[in-house]
Image: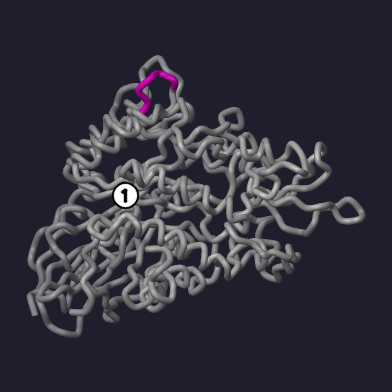
Amino acid sequence: MGQEFSLWWQTGVIYQIYPRSFQDTNGDGIGDIPGITSRLDYLADTLRVDAIWLSPFYPSPMADFGYDVSNYVDVDPVFGTLGSFDEMLQGAHDRGLKVIVDWVPNHSSDQHPWFLESRSSRDSLKREWYVWRDAKPDGSPPNNWLSWFGGGAWEWDETTGQYYLHSFLKEQPDLNWRNPEVKRTMHDVLRFWLDRGVDGVRIDVANMILKDPELRDNPPNPEPAATSGHARAYWSQVHLYDKSHPDVHDAFREIRGVLDDYGTSAPRMAVGEMFESDRRASASYYGNNLDELHMPFNFALISAPWTAQAVRNVVDITEAIVPAGGWPNYVLGNHDQHRLASRIGAEQARVGMTLLLTLRGTPTMYYGDELGMHDVPITLEQVHDPWELNEPGLGRDAERTPMQWNTQPNAGFCALDVQPWLPIAGDYREINVAVEREEQSSTISLTRSLLELRRAHPCLAVGSYRPVDDGPESCFVYLREHEQHRCLVALNFSAESQTVALQKRERGSILVSTHLDRVEEVDLSRLHLRPNEGCVIEVGRR
């Protein structure tokens, strides 16, 4: 029925690793690439995910923990070497895992040799590699653009008497993608990692790489709270000119061309991080001919209220705006968002995991969410995130704490006598891989069961999506269908029992319940759901 979606990035499940927090092997309290290598069996055999995405591991002064890159074609010594990266990559491929790496093309570190040369003189050969402008006659910045991390987006340089643009920290100057040399060089960076064998890239702030060439002022935002409740100062403007310029579509087509040069037998993919309040604008980055990004990251489930109706609305809109032949994707957590269990509670987090792994589209999981890890309280003395220092209350350290592997001190993340770079959660003795693997009702047991179902039932991986209207308002019910196979997913978003009454009298078999205690045949005309329960039900073949 319709187009077949069978490529690895369509059928698979992506698992995000924040390298600093996954596994330390050299005793410095910071996770590293050999640590990832040591945990590949967990990823491939215990969880059985299909791909891993690594947040930045490149040389960096770590002003923004790797998103300020000082060398795009090497590994920071704190994480390892190119040799240890190659070993990890080979180990992943040997286990059938694909590897996606972060690519940060919008900005570099201010310590990158390119920027050091650019700021050395107005006559520097690399001056136009970055965005430099004169001050206004009164000495103020060239326009009113704001930094995502607070304050203005322009920094005065005393040496050359001009401002440079930084959409993020002042230590992260924006590269000038209108300069052909910059574009060629960043394409070469992409080829460097593709030549090593990586299977795809996640493009950081992808739609920000091209701005208005006239540098016009952004207009004020009449409803900043309605746009986003997160980066408050930033949303005081409508970001009309500092991102999402129409020319970015040409840039994406060229990037896609680089990826497609590596052939179609083992296609390389690109998923883009987008800052768009208009979801249709995000969908435009698939390209009119599906010739831009393979997937723009879809964060709508993170920002939506956690109610059945709001979540269904996200899914229905996603299904409506993804172009014909395009493939959806969903995310419920990452290194920039409070952890799922902290946002919606531990019981509903299990419903959320069931949702994520049964929707039509590629799911991306965040490390530790398979355990039900929570945010960890961070004291002022423990703060590392520059955003927290610039705008208190917006920091991201709480969701970046070390992975919880076992009951030993430091949760098996690092040696007993080592101070981890961020504190370990207080509940690590109960919430960890070793304990949860032995508990039949644990969150990791649920996650594994759902991942196994995706593999065993093609309707859950590549089948069509059809919402069902027969449930109460607090339930989201949908049908996944592929050829003759059907699965019904019924999710109770409330803390009260609910009954779903399908109009068509039919019976089905529960394959998994979020409580992990029901495997039984049920009457779908009166399907009872307990509080905070979700069920995946195999329905009779058509």
From the image, tell me which residue sits under label 1. 199
- Span highlighted in magenta in the image: 23-28
On the image, the x and y values in percent for residue 4 come to 21, 71
Q: What is the magenta segment's predominant secondary structure? A: loop
Foreground pick, 288 / 260: 260
Percent across and percent down for residue 441 are 20, 46
**Percent from the top left, x then y, of residue 443?**
26, 46
Quadrant of the image containing the C terminus: bottom left
The answer to whether 507 is drawn above or below residue 14 in the figure is: below
**Amino acid carrying mark 1 in the image:** Asp
Image-based side of 16 in relation to 87, left or right: right
Residue 91 appearing in the image: yes
Q: Give the answer, above or below, for where 496 lies relative to 200.
A: below
Whether residue 249 appears in magenta in the rendering, the answer is: no
Instruction: Pick the residue in front: 356 or 535.
Output: 356
Q: Specify few, some or many for label 1: CA neighbours under 10 Å numbering under 14, 14-19, or 20 or more.
A: many
Res 483 → quadrant: bottom left
User: Where residue 502 appears, x then y in whole percent?
Assistant: 20, 80
